[in-house]
Amino acid sequence: MLARRIVPCLDIKEGRVVKGVRFVELSDAGDPVELARRYEAEGADELVFLDITATVEGRRATLAVVRAVAAELTIPFAVGGGVAGVEHVNDLLRAGCDKVSVNSAAVRDPDIVRAASRRFGAQCIVVAIDARRSPNAPSGFEVVVDGGRTATGRDAVAWAAECERLGAGELLVTSIDRDGTRAGFDIPLLRAIRDACNLPVIASGGAGTVQHFVDVFRDADADAALAASLFHYAELAIDDLKAALAREGIVVRRETVAV
């Protein structure tokens, strides 16, 4: 059985890590390079960096931050924010990240996923899906874009299945309803997407306790679980989390890096 991954997420705004609730009410959480270094030392399996205002501001993710982080890390990391085409993917990969996350642009032009996968390989193309509950969506979950600001009318579960057909290598699924609430991952959303496609799923939105991670791995069969503020403010150490998961019989990697 493959080990389940623990993935800290660093939301970047103006070169700083920020954290909010349901994508708003942002507060400063630190320097991205320092946090990246700390998370690798604590045993994170991967990192995700999202430039959360790049799309709505019509710009790309900051390449300088990507290069600075790449110089410090040995674990894989993904970068997203403002990715609007294959050349953007190319620039981010050349700056040093291992994967590129595409979100709003992929919804508006799905061929970006197909073209990027063909050029660079599915293993480095992550489609990020931000979803919220909606009675109008067949599955009960609707895709939203532009950092949660714009409803699309697209069903989140159907979109996940389409992403697999387009050549995505992984899905990063964020529940807008749970983001920053620490009320637990949205198991029905994640389970529905897991059942609809065979891609690895990174669960995001709602982590607050060790039990929430246990639940998302057991009940939603997520491949990885992402959290932000819980780790940023040192309320739960990654190695402590992994030790607790191992006691529950969940397979995780148990390695830390000397600082």
Image (cartoon, rainbow, N blue to C red):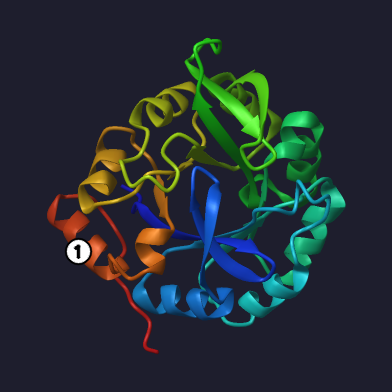
Q: Is residue 68 left or right of residue 134?
A: right
User: Circle 1: is it few (<14), some (14-19), or many (20+) Cα within 10 Å?
Assistant: some
Say if 193 sits above or below 199 in the image: above
Q: Nearer the viewer, residue 141 or 76?
A: 141
Q: Is residue 117 above or below residue 63?
A: above
The reply to whether residue 161 is visible in this rendering is yes
Q: For mark 1, give the secondary structure.
A: helix
In the image, is 30 to the left or to the right of 102?
Answer: left
Residue located at (38% from left, 40% from top): 222
Total numbered labels: 1
Q: Position of residue 166 (x, y in %)?
A: 70, 30
Q: Is residue 162 above or below residue 201?
A: above
From this viewpoint, which residue is outermost toward the front? 25
Residue 80: x and y, percent? Answer: 67, 54
The residue depicted at 64 percent of the width and 43 percent of the height is 147
Q: To which residue does mark 1 refer?
A: 243
Residue 110: x %, y % from top left: 76, 30
Q: Residue at x 74, y 54 (%)?
A: 54
Asked whether, in this view, residue 181 is left or right of residue 35, the answer is left
Outermost residue, bottom side: 259
Find the residue positioned furthest to the right: 87
- Where does residue 56 sit, x and y in percent of width and height? 76, 46
Nearest to the observer: residue 26 or residue 158: 26
Examine the rendered structure and indicate whether residue 16 appears above or below residue 160.
Answer: below
Is residue 113 in sight in this rendering? no
Q: Residue at x 72, y 31 (%)?
A: 107
Amino acid under disc 1: Ala
Residue at the limit of the structure toward the left, as seen here? 247
* Rendered image quadrant of residue 186: top left
Quadrant containing the C terminus is bottom left
